[in-house]
């Protein structure tokens, strides 16, 4: 079936927000496909209808779109291998499950929830929880323990049942992982996974194999949490007679908590104050809201660059890569086996680098959602100019208002104590003079404003160093911000003079 063209897929379940580990899986699939001139497929694994969440599929599409990752085939862009939602492929799975039963590689199980609970209770030991496997299947209600007549009667009366894989005993399943090398499994330790559920829907185990085969997938990259399922999938490829077409596997390392102890979760983000989802997600069931990287003020390019480096290295000193450069340099053999610790400060550093090198007009557009609630009209051109003045101070776009509000509204309070340290009659006289001279200035740009300031310094005998900080505090409210004459140029003559006069009254 395989035609030697690289075809990879990302197959999320529409059950909630997209964790950054999921986005990284997408990214590595995408980079690998583009590097090899292949196809990147988005397939929605919605076989577990009980966990289906309204809006989650659209959310996944939006996240990929924000990250600049466009699938070649997806539910929104069908290709030759559709449908691209497993729920729409439902009729095709049962035949393969029944084929496995006929071959003796799977069996029909009629056990109720109570049967399963009592088996787990009865056969658990001090060191092992009981599972439905080669040891316990002989004591359960299934087509291996019942007669053919009993099975037929149960099927005729529509008794709820599932189909389970019959894991072989005393075998070792081996495969070569593109990241981990040779990996082996003892089949005695793997349970008889359900392949087809009572509602006729396949489980992930059956669906992923059938879909990867029918969609001609050449390489399957997924998180290392799926490693324990690998022996089931490998045996299904073999039992269905598709072994020669089996994709090459790569199990990606986990993204770890900042301290390295365990997989990074949403709870860690909540606890430590950083996002773990690509974009804001509101769970429609609980209405619980989770912040995303986008809404925290990350640029998509910074987010994808940061993610690419979480578990992969280019072998170069370079850390900043455009998407095209990532495509050019990406190779799966430079993905690490060990988990990668998530470092939010480093993530913000990536974002700061991208903010500094991004065009001011685009930044002005991206910052709009962060100032929408300020109820002030700002012209695009002015916003872009101000962005150019403050962007080197920003790690996140959400910090813009704190760093730049004084350009648009007069500060409600000023740091009087910062001025008072240098304040005396001479400085007061200087600022009275400066306000007059600025009010009379013919030209209004930062060069002209500085000339007026220097003229007032010379005339009053004040030291420049003693006047600069008070001027900044009068205009900005505190000891921060870009060049003070550039600030004056942007806020305008009347506002500059007005702020000096207001400060003089306060002092």
Image (spheres, grey):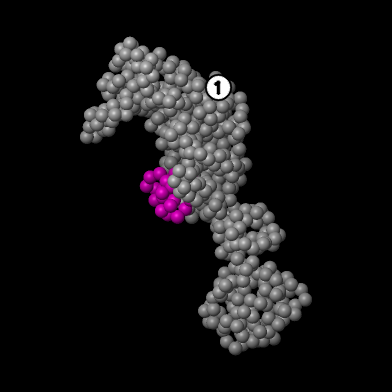
Q: Residue at x 55, y 33 (%)?
A: 42
Closer-to-camera residue (300/93)? 93
Residue 190 is left or right of residue 29, and the answer is left
Location of residue 2 by image quarter: top right
- Quadrant of the drawing holding the N terminus: top right
Residue 146 location (% of width, % of height): 30, 15
Secondary structure type for disc 1: loop
- Quadrant of the drawing holding the C terminus: bottom right
Q: Which residues are magenta?
A: 255-277
Where 27 falls versus 210 (above or below)?
A: below
Location of residue 355 by image quarter: bottom right
Other residues around mark 1 within 10 Å, as few (<14) / some (14–19) / many (≥20): some
Closer-to-camera residue (291/345)? 291
Q: Residue at x 52, y 25 (%)?
A: 89
Closer-to-camera residue (361/99)? 99
Whether residue 264 is in magenta: the answer is yes
Q: Residue at x 39, y 51 (%)?
A: 259
Q: Could you tell me if residue 372 is visible in this image?
A: yes
Residue 419 is left or right of residue 460, and the answer is left
Residue 318 location (% of width, % of height): 56, 48
Where 135 falls versus 271 (above or below)?
A: above
Whether residue 342 is in magenta: the answer is no
Residue 67 is left or right of residue 460, and the answer is left
Residue farthest to the top?
149
What residue does disc 1 label? 2
């Amino acid at each position: 079936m395989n035609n030697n063209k690289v075809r990879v897929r990302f197959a999320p379940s529409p059950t909630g927000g997209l964790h950054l580990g999921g986005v990284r899986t997408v990214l590595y699939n995408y980079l690998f496909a583009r590097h090899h001139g292949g196809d990147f497929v988005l397939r929605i694994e919605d076989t577990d209808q009980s966990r289906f969440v309204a809006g989650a599929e659209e959310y996944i599409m939006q996240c990929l779109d924000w990250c600049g990752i466009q699938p070649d085939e997806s539910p929104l862009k069908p290709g030759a291998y559709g449908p691209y939602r497993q729920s729409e492929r439902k009729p095709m799975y049962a035949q393969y499950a029944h084929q496995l039963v006929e071959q003796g590689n799977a069996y029909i199980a009629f056990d109720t929830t109570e049967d399963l609970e009592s088996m787990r209770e009865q056969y658990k030991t001090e060191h092992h929880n009981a599972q439905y496997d080669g040891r316990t299947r002989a004591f359960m209600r299934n087509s291996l323990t019942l007669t053919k007549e009993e099975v037929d009667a149960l099927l005729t009366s529509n008794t709820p049942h599932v189909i389970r894989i019959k894991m072989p005993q005393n075998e070792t399943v081996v495969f070569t992982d593109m990241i981990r090398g040779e990996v082996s499994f003892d089949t005695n330790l793997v349970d008889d996974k359900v392949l087809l559920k009572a509602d006729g829907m396949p489980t992930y185990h059956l669906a992923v194999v059938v879909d990867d085969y029918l969609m001609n997938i050449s390489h399957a990259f997924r998180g290392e949490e799926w490693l324990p399922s690998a022996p089931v999938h490998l045996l299904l490829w073999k039992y269905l007679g598709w072994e020669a077409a089996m994709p090459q596997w790569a199990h990606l390392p986990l993204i770890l908590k900042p301290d390295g102890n365990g997989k990074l979760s949403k709870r860690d983000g909540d606890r430590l104050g950083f996002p773990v989802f690509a974009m804001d997600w509101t769970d429609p069931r609980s209405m619980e809201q989770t912040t995303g990287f986008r809404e925290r003020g990350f640029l998509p390019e910074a987010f994808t660059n940061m993610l690419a480096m979480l578990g992969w290295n280019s072998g170069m000193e370079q850390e900043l890569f455009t998407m095209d450069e990532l495509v050019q340099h990406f190779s799966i053999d430079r993905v690490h086996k060990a988990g990668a610790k998530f470092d939010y400060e480093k993530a913000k550093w990536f974002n700061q680098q991208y903010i500094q090198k991004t065009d001011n007009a685009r930044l002005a557009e991206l910052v709009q959602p962060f100032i929408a609630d300020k109820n002030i009209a700002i012209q695009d051109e002015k916003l872009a100019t101000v962005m150019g003045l403050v962007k080197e101070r920003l790690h996140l776009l959400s910090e813009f208002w704190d760093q730049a509000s004084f350009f648009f509204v007069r500060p409600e309070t000023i740091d009087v104590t910062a001025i008072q340290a240098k304040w005396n009659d001479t400085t007061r006289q200087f600022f009275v003079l400066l306000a007059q001279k600025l009010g009379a200035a013919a030209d209004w740009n930062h060069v002209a404003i500085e000339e007026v300031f220097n003229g007032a310094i010379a005339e009053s005998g004040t030291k420049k160093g003693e006047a600069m900080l008070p001027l900044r505090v009068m205009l900005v409210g505190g000891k921060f911000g870009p060049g003070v004459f550039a600030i004056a140029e942007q806020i305008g003559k009347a506002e500059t003079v007005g702020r000096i006069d207001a400060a003089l009254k306060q002092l």
